Amino acid sequence: MPADFASPAPRINAIATAVPDCDVHERYTEWAASQLDDERKAKLFRRMESRGGISHRYSVLTGGDAAMDFGSFYKRGDEPGTRARMERYAAHAPDLAMQAIAGLPSTEGITHIVIASCTGFLAPGLDQIIARRLGLSTGVERVSIGFMGCYAGVTLLRTAAHIVRSDPWARALAVSVELCSLHLQQSDNIESLLAMGQFADGAAAVIVSAQGEGLGLGKGLSLALEESDELITWTIGDSGFVMHLSGEVPGKLAEALDDASVCNAIMGDDPPVAWAVHPGGRSVLDAVERGLSLDPAALSASRSVLDTFGNMSSATVLFVLEKLAPDKPETGIALAFGPGLAMEGLRFGWVTGDA
């Protein structure tokens, strides 16, 4: 059993992911570029967007809405209000969550549900909706984690692990679902358009228990950088949730990770074999690689997820773990970044049924 793991260690027994059918990446690029009246700026935007390390992003929007045609959800001059966006969230988030859950081998014996989502609100919440659709006991214990942003995927796993540590017979279903495409904003600012051009929709579901083999979940790590609270913000406005992602984030992140105390806290006594780093953008992954002096291949799983799916907020780190799990890594660490600027981490490593 890896160091820093309780016995019996909480572990991910199964993990499954899902994305909607509609790939909107190329159409977004044209929609965003059309908002820049200066053709030189539009060309610059397209060039920078093409270097972002993303080939595909998926959205629950379909048909003309996904194409961003006139009269669609994002028609020019008439942005959808927060209510309209939340109606779409309520209509699509449960279905996408259930699509991910359907990929799990079994949901029998679930005692707890933990939900993470920062792109929408509804009540009764996703926790109750999912429990009802799965036919779970009305007494199943439920926890909802909201509005934490991209690092909530790590918090989701830590919460499920804490539940299992407190009750070794617990079987927790942890689900992240994010519909980032519901919060696009009209803008003539290249930095804002590039930031929005990273985000996509996706869901992930995991089973966490203290039985069987799987990715053991160990010690957590939290860090909030001083004087960085304006670098990443997520504000509820009249036209949805407005993301601000400063271009200073990669530099600040690399500087923080280069600090000896931070680096030692992440690396521990032995450097992890596997890295599940939230792909918050190509520049963020480059900053982590540079700040921690990692081999370029160390973040290959994260770069692959970014290329194939984009940044799905809290669900994304779970997509990375799904790619790493088949290799049964002996040791690893998951890292994710979000509003603050803050970082959440969690050690993991393969454990057998008797660990």
Image (cartoon, rainbow, N blue to C red):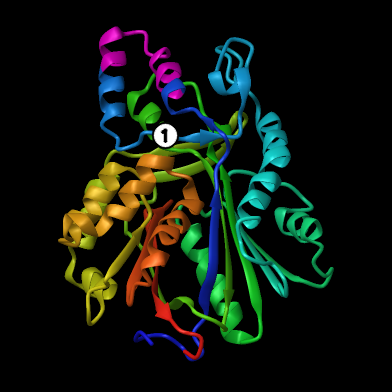
Up-down relation of residue 65 to residue 2 (above or below)? above
Q: Is residue 274 left or right of residue 199?
A: left
Is 21 positioned to the left or the right of 81 in the image?
left
Rendering coords of residue 198 (x, y %): 40, 36
Q: Nearer the viewer, residue 280 or 308?
A: 308
Chain part drawn in magenta = 28-43
**Residue name at image x 42 percent, y 66 percent:** 325
Residue 330 percent location from the top left of the image: 33, 77
Q: Residue at x 52, y 55 (%)?
A: 148
Q: Indicate whether 59 appears above or below 8.
A: above
Towards the viewer: 127 or 295: 295
Where residue 88 sits, quadrant-wise, is top right
Query: Where the N terminus falls, by quadrant?
Result: bottom left
Magenta-drawn stretch, dominant element (helix, strand or loop):
helix
Query: Which residue is the site of mark 1?
Result: 56
Q: Is residue 149 visible?
A: no
Taking the spot 50% from the left edge, 91% from the top edge, the residue there is 354
Task: Check the image and report above or below for 12 versus 8.
Answer: above
Report the front residue among 347 and 224. 347
Q: Position of residue 252 (x, y in %)?
A: 25, 51
**SS at circle 1:** loop
Look at the image and say whether residue 132 sits in the magenta stretch: no
Camera sees residue 262: yes
Residue type at mark 1: give it.
Answer: His
> What is the residue that sits farthest to the right in this orientation?
138
Give the x, y percent position of residue 190.
33, 24
Give the image quarter of residue 76: top right
